[in-house]
């Protein structure tokens, strides 16, 4: 059992209220740690610390900030087994197939920021006035409020923390309560790598309390958030006027055309549905299939679901652990019930699997004939489900894909370049993957939601995050003469 603390102004501290909350292993329900239940006052202390110390990172030369990010990567690599272990205990994802990978990617995220900040060039702009010389520089925004979810408790925070620090921002970070133990462990790595005290502050506790405080507080200059659309939109209102980087939900439409390599298409699509038990913003959440290959696709999906191994996340044979929390499991229950009431056919799975250790295990599920007015079709399910809907033409498949309030990542499987472009140019998502699942992404590629949808604002990834997390300043110099 771990007794963990928050990190404010370079000190490990209790909540000023003295209250704590328990972190539980979702695979067993056992308590693994106690953490401080932060209050608004704790959040205000963290914001004050970030403001007092922001000069330490803003004034640090760029190459030194890059070295700092490199050092953090080295510490995380050195502590990778411990980090992967606490990640599995806290989040529930399989240790061998997923947690170790997440830790590797986490270290890479710090290295990625270290590289990109060095090459972030700005422009020298020609002007009409012959006496002026005009150029731009990029500067840190100041103090960032960062709120992150529980599905990738290392990788998602690093998408903000690494470029945020590399760009010279101070940070106040509120992680999701159900994965705050692993957040503490990452901040230990930052401390070990000698991030200056007060530059990164960690406040644990309920999002609507400590998260709300840091978002709305006048002492934070900008906000980064990954999570649900509803909370993201609420945060945008609370943060009114501040620069926002919001990565919200997705509904991963995946179009499988009759000319596709079906075996490969279904194999990677099933991974898109079941990896991390479906708890991924870019998970495959709707499979829109040409009716000529509908039967074959459905059969292949069922056999892919049969191969998933639920079980103890520390067992080498396990490929899927439990869901992280009860509200997410309840959402799966609700979506599956609603889809069946509206006419969908359950082909495989479809219920919780407490026989594996806790009520949060959920069977990999395949549902066919999912109607467009069902919650399973319209909302983000965030569980291990492959929902199939068939249609008879490219136009109808496109209409189905775009008939959704979310627009993060889509995928198209076809051997025809013409049809691939037909979809790529018309799909209303920020990213379109052709002949790979909605999961494909690399750390330096721009990632984010399409305008007009509820999937977020701005772009994460490599230099694109740095552009979001810096102010562009224009310097106009009259040289006389
Ligand atoms: P939320 O978006 O509500 O929560 C994400 C984070 O925001 C949590 O740390 C939460 O804290 C915090 N938060 C909640 N309310 C506020 C607030 N008013 N001000 C500041 N921070 C706040 O998602 P949930 O965890 O409730 O999950 C619900 C659904 O959201 C999932 O089933 C999934 O569909 C979607 N989701 C999407 C993610 C993505 O990557 N796109 C990630 C996570 C969830 P607390 O838990 O204390 O409320």
Image (cartoon, grey):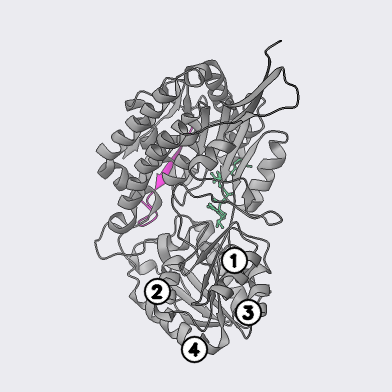
Magenta-colored stretch includes residue 311: no
Secondary structure under tag 2 reads: helix
* Res 361 visible: no
> Gap in Å between the C-alphas at discs 3 and 2?
22 Å
**Of pointers 3 and 2, the one earlier in the residue sequence:** 2
Q: Is residue 296 left or right of residue 476?
A: left
Secondary structure under the numbered disc 3 in the rendered image: helix
Residue that mark 2 sits on: 267
Q: Is residue 111 above or below residue 343?
A: above
Can you name the residue that lies furthest to the top here?
481
Q: CA distance from mark 3 to mark 4?
A: 18 Å
Asked if residue 24 lies in the magenta stretch, the reply is yes
How many residues crowd around disc 3 within 10 Å: few (fewer than 14), some, or many (20 or more)? some
Q: Do tag 1 and tag 3 residues touch (Cβ < 8 Å)?
A: no
Q: Secondary structure at mark 4?
A: helix
Stretch of the chain drawn in magenta: 19-30
Residue depicted at x 53% and y 73%: 417
Q: Residue 20's x, y, as percent?
A: 46, 35
Point out which mark residue 424 bears: 1
Per the rendering, the mark at residue 394 is: 3
Q: Earlier in the sequence, mark 3 or mark 4?
A: 4
Give the mark toward the camera: 3 or 2. 3
């Amino acid at each position: 059992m771990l007794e963990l603390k928050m990190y404010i102004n370079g000190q490990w501290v209790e909540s000023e209220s003295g209250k704590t909350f328990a972190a539980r292993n979702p695979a067993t329900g056992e308590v693994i740690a106690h953490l401080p239940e932060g209050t608004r006052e704790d959040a205000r202390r963290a914001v004050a610390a970030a403001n007092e110390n922001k000069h330490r990172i803003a004034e640090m030369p760029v190459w030194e900030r890059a070295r700092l990010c490199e050092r953090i990567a080295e510490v995380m690599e050195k502590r990778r087994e411990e980090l992967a272990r606490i990640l599995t205990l806290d989040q529930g994802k399989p240790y061998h197939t997923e947690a170790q990978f997440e830790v590797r990617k986490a270290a890479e995220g710090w290295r990625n920021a270290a590289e990109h900040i060095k090459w972030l060039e700005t422009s020298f702009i020609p002007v009409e006035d012959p006496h002026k010389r005009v150029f731009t520089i990029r500067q840190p925004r100041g103090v960032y409020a960062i709120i992150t979810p529980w599905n990738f408790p290392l990788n998602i925070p690093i998408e903000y923390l690494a470029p945020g620090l590399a760009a010279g921002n101070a940070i106040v970070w509120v992680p999701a309560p159900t994965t705050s133990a692993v957040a503490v462990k990452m901040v230990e790595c930052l401390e070990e790598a000698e991030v200056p005290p007060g530059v990164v502050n960690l406040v644990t506790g309920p999002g609507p309390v400590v998260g709300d405080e840091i978002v709305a507080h006048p002492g934070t200059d900008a906000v980064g958030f990954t999570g649900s659309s509803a909370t993201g939109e609420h945060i945008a209102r609370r943060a009114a006027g501040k620069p926002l980087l919001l990565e919200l939900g997705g509904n991963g439409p995946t179009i499988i055309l009759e000319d596709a390599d079906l075996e490969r298409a279904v194999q990677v699509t099933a991974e898109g549905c079941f990896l991390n038990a479906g708890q991924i913003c870019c998970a495959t959440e709707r499979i829109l299939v040409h009716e000529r290959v509908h039967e074959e696709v459905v059969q292949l999906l069922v056999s892919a679901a049969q191969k998933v191994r639920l079980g103890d996340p520390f067992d080498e044979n396990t490929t899927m652990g439990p869901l992280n929390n009860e509200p997410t499991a309840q959402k799966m229950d609700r979506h599956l019930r609603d889809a069946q009431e509206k006419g969908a056919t359950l082909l495989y799975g479809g219920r919780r699997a407490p026989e594996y250790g806790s009520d949060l295990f959920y069977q990999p599920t395949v549902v066919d004939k999912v109607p467009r007015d069902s919650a399973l079709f319209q909302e983000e399910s965030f569980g291990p489900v492959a929902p199939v809907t068939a249609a008879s033409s490219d136009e109808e498949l496109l209409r189905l894909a775009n008939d959704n309030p979310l627009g993060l990542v889509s995928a198209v499987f076809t051997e025809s370049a013409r049809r691939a472009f037909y979809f790529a140019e018309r799909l209303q998502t920020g990213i379109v993957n052709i002949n790979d699942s909605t999961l494909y992404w690399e750390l330096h590629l721009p990632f984010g939601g399409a305008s007009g949808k509820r999937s977020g604002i701005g772009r994460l990834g490599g230099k694109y995050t740095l552009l979001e997390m810096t102010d562009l300043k224009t310097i106009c110099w009259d040289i006389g003469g």
